[in-house]
Image (cartoon, grey):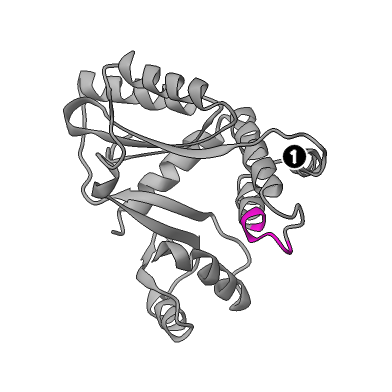
Amino acid sequence: MGRKWANIVAKKTAKDGANSRVYAKFGIEIYAAAKSGDPDPHSNQKLKFVLDRAKQANVPKNIIDRAIEKAKGSTDESFQELRYEGFGPSGSMIIVDTLTSNVNRTAANVRAAFSKNGGNMGNSGSVSYLFDNTGVLVFQGENPDKWLEILIESNIDVRDVLEEEGAIVIYTEPESLHAAREMLIAKGVSEFSITELEMIAQNDISLSGENLERFEKIVDALDDDEDVQKVFHNVENS
């Protein structure tokens, strides 16, 4: 599983390059998390997790504060988390996680992103069964055996711990991601480059030429949609 994290970093870096788009998506996610419970991250773990990820992505404080203040207001705007699955060219598979206040708009936009660029929407479960829902944590460090031992002694359900390019990469069961992060902080880890729940493909494929161009057009169209929070796929060179 070690080679998978490089794809996550690449996609995250590419997305972070479009700062205004990333900030806007985080603003919606923060608002929705705060609105779903107490707008205080100390008592709302979902909000706390989103805020931690927002800080990793360098989301400005004013955007974070504005989203939380909006959630404290009387607005009745509500958001739904929805997942779409589909196929691109030559065996490529795509999972799209959305957070939307308008289901009809989002469904139409996602469908158009596929159909206008040579892809096809699939039914629920048509793609996701070939991906593993996985917690991923990455931080600068060494000695993966030490961190694996710490995780096991702390009863954290961990799938793998690796050292790659000067970083420790930890894969956990999805429900153990929060506990693993808190434990690592307690053990002195002060900064993470990735703390995410990822859908990681069980097998990656490589595309080239026209197929790669068509696939990238689908992903770009999805990423450009304000309702789309995450896009997962099985293409290793994109």
Foreground of the two, 165 or 126: 126
Q: Position of residue 74 (x, y in %)?
A: 81, 37
Q: Quadrant of residue 236?
A: top left
State the residue at coordinates (41%, 51%).
198
Within 10 Å of disc 1 (Cα), the crowding (few <14, some 14-19, many 20+) is: many
Q: Quadrant of residue 216?
A: top left
Q: Position of residue 20 (x, y in %)?
A: 64, 29
Q: Position of residue 28 (x, y in %)?
A: 64, 36
State the residue at coordinates (55%, 38%).
80
State the residue at coordinates (46%, 54%).
197
Residue 167 visible at all: no
Image position of 137 (left or right of 76): left
Q: Secondary structure at mark 1?
A: helix
Q: Position of residue 149 (x, y in %)?
A: 41, 83
Q: Which residues are magenta?
A: 42-48
Callout 1 amino acid: Ala
Residue 48 to residue 114: above or below: below
Foreground of the two, 37 or 189: 37
Image position of 16 (left or right of 166): right
Is residue 45 highlighted in magenta?
Answer: yes
Q: Which quadrant holds the C terminus?
A: top left
State the residue at coordinates (39%, 65%).
173
According to the image, label 1 marks what residue?
67
Q: Which quadrant holds the N terminus?
A: bottom left
